[in-house]
Image (cartoon, helix red, strand yellow):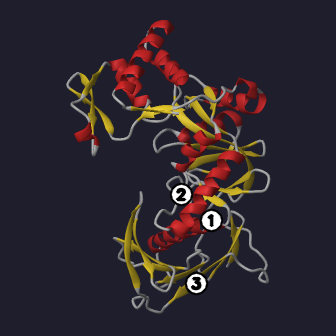
């Protein structure tokens, strides 16, 4: 098989993907070669460095080999899948019998996908945790932490605007000379929704739940910090992780990234689309962010909201902080970067309080958090 995935030419001795992807000419050089080997890989000498990669759906042991390259082994699988990869992930050798069941094929696809995402880095391509839709020939990505509602926002665009999914979970974003393109890939994660298309990427929207609709432009540095959380980075491999971070920096400068506050209803989709494509002057300008420092958690004990230090902060922080219901809500919002203006808007939408009172109370709480050195700003 010779086929493209995200513009990358792949030659494989196995039929790994169910979707029909565009093939390339047999005379062309492949970017990635995947082969099946019946030889043993037990004689490969590993360095004294073993890393366990814990992922959402499977775990891998990764071994750095003395003669170069990496050996990947899926843990907890009776199939014993092992794949040898060169340092640049351009050659993948699978040490396993050809899969005979759907389950064994899915395990193999899952592992090969992981290694192809490593190769993406060397091809100026990123795997982004996002729901991606096409509307009017342009792609828009909804990104954010798991459970925030990326897919429901994408579905709202489909219902209200006639948009179509490109990817339900992890599109490939390819960096081009002028902008970026979003690609559907055949291993789309939990959603299993993708199309074999590529479209120019118009914007990335970092989703936040809110009962109002607002788009906030992010600076290049803010966008970079947001995207680092959502892009695949092979941290065990410094020679690949470094260019991955560089690719994310390029992406943060090449494509507008906005923080999107909205609900999951079609009306919110229409408002967001109108601001993005028809009235960009309505998009709020960038503002400095603030967030709670790592190592503090909020717990409700009886009827009290209590901030408790964790980890290394236990010895540095004396006691705990008791918060009111409004203060606890603000603390929760500050778990992610947010501007003070947007924070005030969230408070006004959540509680029956006038703006002047809410603003004064917010100023007082933020001053307290600064004094306790719980707040990161900038």
Q: Which residue is mark 2?
A: 232
- Which type of secondary structure does the marked residue at label 3 adopt? strand
Q: Mark 2 or mark 3, which is nearer to you?
A: 2
Q: Nearer the viewer, residue 209 or 161?
A: 209
Kindly identify the residue that appears in the image at 66 percent across and 50 percent down: 251
Q: Nearer the viewer, residue 127 or 97?
A: 127
The answer to whether residue 258 is above or below residue 100 is above
Q: Residues within 10 Å of mark 1 (few under 14, many from 20)?
A: many
Q: Nearer the viewer, residue 286 or 92?
A: 286
Cα–Cα gap, marks 2 and 3: 24 Å
Q: Nearer the viewer, residue 239 or 181?
A: 239
Kindly identify the residue that appears in the image at 74 percent across and 80 percent down: 29
- The reply to whether discs 2 and 3 touch (Cβ–Cβ < 8 Å) is no
The quadrant holding residue 124 is bottom right
Q: Which residue is mark 1?
A: 120
Indicate left or right for 82 with 255 as reference.
left
Indicate left or right for 105 with 305 as reference.
right
Give the x, y percent position of residue 230: 53, 49
> Which of marks 3 and 2 precedes in the sequence?
3
Cα–Cα gap, marks 2 and 1: 10 Å
- The reply to whether discs 3 and 1 touch (Cβ–Cβ < 8 Å) is no
- The reply to whether discs 2 and 1 touch (Cβ–Cβ < 8 Å) is yes
Q: Mark 3 or mark 1, which is nearer to you?
A: 1
> Which of marks 1 and 3 precedes in the sequence?
3
Q: Which mark is residue 31?
A: none
Q: Residues within 10 Å of mark 2 (few under 14, many from 20)?
A: many
Indicate left or right for 99 with 131 as reference.
left
The answer to whether residue 217 is above or below residue 342 is below
Kindly identify the residue that appears in the image at 48 percent across and 38 percent down: 148
> Which of marks 1 and 2 precedes in the sequence?
1
Give the x, y percent position of residue 121: 61, 64
Q: Which residue is mark 3?
A: 35
């Amino acid at each position: 098989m010779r086929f493209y995935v995200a513009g990358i030419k792949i030659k494989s001795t196995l039929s790994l993907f169910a979707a029909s992807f565009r093939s390339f000419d047999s005379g062309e050089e492949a970017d990635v070669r995947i082969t099946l080997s019946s030889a043993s890989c037990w004689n490969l000498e590993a360095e004294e460095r073993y890393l366990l990669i814990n992922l959402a759906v499977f775990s891998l042991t990764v071994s750095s080999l003395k003669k170069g390259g990496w050996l990947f082994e899926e843990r907890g699988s009776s199939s014993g899948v092992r794949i040898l990869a060169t340092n640049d992930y351009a050659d993948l050798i699978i040490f396993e019998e050809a899969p005979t069941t759907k389950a064994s094929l899915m395990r193999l696809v899952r592992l090969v996908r992981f290694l192809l995402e490593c190769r993406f880095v060397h091809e100026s391509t990123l795997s982004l945790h996002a729901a991606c839709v096409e509307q009017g020939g342009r792609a828009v990505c909804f990104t954010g932490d798991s459970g925030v509602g990326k897919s429901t926002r994408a579905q709202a665009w489909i219902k209200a605007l006639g948009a179509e999914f490109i990817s339900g979970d992890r599109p490939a974003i390819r960096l081009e000379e002028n902008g970026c393109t979003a690609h559907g890939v055949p291993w789309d994660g939990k959603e299993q929704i993708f199309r074999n298309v590529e479209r120019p990427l118009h914007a990335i929207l970092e989703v936040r739940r809110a009962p109002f609709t607002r788009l906030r432009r992010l600076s290049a540095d803010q966008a970079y910090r947001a995207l680092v959380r959502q892009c695949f980075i092979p941290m065990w491999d410094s020679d690949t992780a470094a260019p991955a971070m560089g690719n994310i920096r390029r992406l943060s400068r090449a494509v507008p990234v906005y923080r999107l506050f909205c609900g999951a209803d079609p009306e919110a989709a229409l408002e967001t689309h109108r601001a993005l494509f028809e009235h960009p002057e309505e998009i709020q300008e960038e503002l400095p962010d603030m967030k709670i420092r790592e190592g503090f958690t909020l717990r409700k004990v009886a009827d009290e909201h209590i901030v408790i230090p964790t980890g290394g902060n236990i010895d540095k922080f004396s006691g705990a902080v008791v918060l009111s219901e409004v203060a606890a809500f603000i603390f929760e919002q500050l778990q992610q970067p947010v501007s003070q203006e947007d924070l005030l808007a969230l408070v006004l939408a959540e509680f029956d309080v006038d703006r002047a009172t809410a603003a004064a109370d917010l100023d007082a709480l933020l001053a307290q958090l600064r004094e306790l050195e719980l707040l990161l700003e900038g």
